[in-house]
Image (cartoon, rainbow, N blue to C red):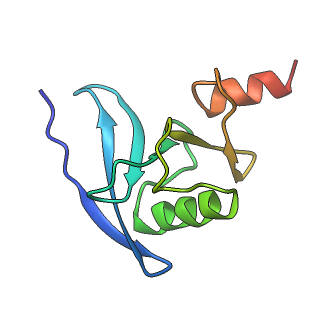
Amino acid sequence: MTHTQKRKIVVAKQEYEWCIRGDALYAEHAAIYKPNINGTALHLDILPWDVEIRPKTISEVVEFALKNSWNPEAKGQPLRIGFTFGQYVILPKGVANSHEYEETLNK
């Protein structure tokens, strides 16, 4: 059993909550969402070695997603964000993580 600690962050004068999700051995992603709203969450792939999960990173991801048409109050599937080649990317449907995304580019 894991314990999920929710953390609060304010980006562009809006409050969000974020936490690391996964099981006891394998963290899968950081989930970012607006509290008390059943909207669309962000899922940040935390597998790349060059992603430090800290408030600054979470703030950058929220700003990136908002600039790319993320509406945290609209219902829908989570928007998956990866980090590859030194920048954040929106992961296409069917691509599980940043490593798979890089493999699709190399085909």
Vertical side of 71 occupied by 44: above or below: above
How many marks do you count on the picture? 0
Residue 76: image x %, image y %? 50, 39
Closest to the observer, 42 or 36: 36
Residue 96: image x %, image y %? 57, 25
Vertical side of 40 occupied by 2: above or below: above
Residue 90: image x %, image y %? 67, 43
Vertical side of 35 occupied by 31: above or below: above
Residue 80: image x %, image y %? 56, 39
Figure quadrant of the N terminus: top left
Answer with the quarter of the image where residue 81 lies: top right
The residue that appears at 59% across and 30% down in the rendered structure is: 97
Vertical side of 54 occupied by 76: above or below: above
Closest to the observer, 33 or 98: 33
Q: Is residue 17 left or right of residue 65?
A: left
Residue at the bottom extreme of this rendering: 13
The residue that appears at 50% across and 35% down in the rendered structure is: 77
The residue that appears at 84% across and 28% down in the rendered structure is: 105
Answer with the quarter of the image where residue 79 lies: top right
Q: Is residue 46 left or right of residue 22?
A: right
Q: Is residue 107 left or right of residue 71?
A: right
Figure quadrant of the C terminus: top right
Q: Is residue 6 left or right of residue 79?
A: left
Residue at the front extreme of this rendering: 74
